[in-house]
Amino acid sequence: MQQKEMGYGVYGWRRVKRYACRMENIKAEATRRLEILKFWDKHGMAATLDAYKVSRRTLYRWKQLYKSANGKIAALSNQSRAPKRRRVRQWPTEILVRLKELRLSYPSLGAEKLQSFLADWCEPRNLACPKTRTVMRLIAERAELKKAQPPRLKVVHRKPAHPRKPKGFTATYPGQCVGVDTIEIQRDGQRRYISTFTDINSRFALAVASTNKSSKRATILWRLSKACFPYKIERVLSDNGSEFKAAFDTEVAQDGVGRWLTYPKTPKMNAHVERFNGSLQNEFAAYHEDLLFTDVNLFNDKLLDYLVWFNTERPHYGLGLLSPYEFLKNNHQCNMYWRKTGYCPISKIRYTTRR
């Protein structure tokens, strides 16, 4: 069985582990030195030098560090022994300038390949060429060589921006913008979907139930809207769901209709269709849920009767307590797209005819 350390998979665990080990070693050494100082105070200098094999100068230095730190044990830990003034590698200026030029010309090459170019340049000039390890150290030590690389451009592949509904947009006439959405209903591990359509200006609504959520199913709703809604549609507003892509997007584009997409997790951008979804669920779907999961076709037949009532008789606060049909009848300017019937444009579709 494979065994892994306690912090496996935790970012920065090994670094913290190294720091912990280092602090543990420092604490142990400082504790030993404090014991020696206490032994010195109790038994004297001669016994301390004989027992611990340390010099007199070292004892006085530890005592001074401990006293200057006001009794903090951390002052007795090992200090860095690195030289304060380190040796700087001395090489001819011509070689350093040439190495900087190579770094700028070939920013992706390592020390070995740079050394081969540098050797070819030094040989005809009778200059001693640094070895590969020396070239590596020169680059690491000298700031002008370390930074002698052109800035690497970061290529950002941005997705094309989706067209969004303008802020503060209000539909002023029927068909200027319609909203579409999908309701998902789950029960006993099964799912059913209701595709919904709403005209933002007139609240005219349509819906179709199906057993799966696909773009081909959404095109059925789109064709139904073209057959029933008596105005030309200019824009379609939807979320980023997969059912409103592929076949649905292609058919909408072929009809010359623009698309607007809402931002992720912002249902308020398509508030009118969300309001219709709530009404549809509370007034119809909740009472015919069993039929939705047993016979979708019969559910759609009853749904059509509900839509006729919703569009012709049900009053809406947003329309001044008028039904969508009454609102369209009072505000329409031309009868060109209206059917020759006494009912709502969607009522009894099989009996409607063009003029």
Image (cartoon, grey):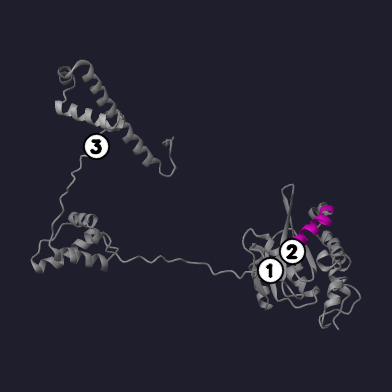
For disc 1, the marked residue is 237
Residue 82 spot, x, y in % from top left: 20, 42
- The residue indicated by pointer 3 is 79
Mark 2–mark 1 CB contact (< 8 Å): yes
Mark 3 is surrounded, within 10 Å at the Cα level, by few (under 14), some (14 to 19) or many (20 or more) other residues, namely: few
Q: Amino acid at mark 2?
A: Val
Q: Would you say 261 lies left or right of 58 here?
A: right
Please say whether residue 284 is one of the residues in the magenta stretch.
Answer: yes
What residue sits 68% from the left and 60% below the top?
267
Magenta stretch bounds: 271-287
> Which residue is the extreme one toward the top?
43
**Mark nearer the N terminus (2 vs 3):** 3
Find residue 57 and name its label: none
Viewer-nearest of labels 1 and 3? 3
Decide whether the magenta segment is chiefly helix, strand or loop: helix
Q: Where is the N terminus found, in terms of image quarters?
A: top left
Task: Residue type at mark 1: give it.
Answer: Leu
Quarter occupied by the C terminus: bottom right
Secondary structure found at label 3: loop
Q: Any mark on residue 273, and which?
A: 2
Residue 231: percent from left, percent from top: 78, 77
Tell me which residue sits at (75%, 69%) in the image. Answer: 200
Alpha carbon separation for disc pair 2 and 3: 72 Å
Q: What distance separates the C-alpha of mark 1 from that of mark 3?
A: 69 Å
Depth check, mark 2 against mark 3: the one in front is 3
- Give the answer, above or below, for where 137 lies relative to 347: above
Q: Quadrant of residue 58?
A: top left
Q: Is residue 171 left or right of residue 150?
A: right
Indicate the secondary structure of the residue bearing disc 1.
strand
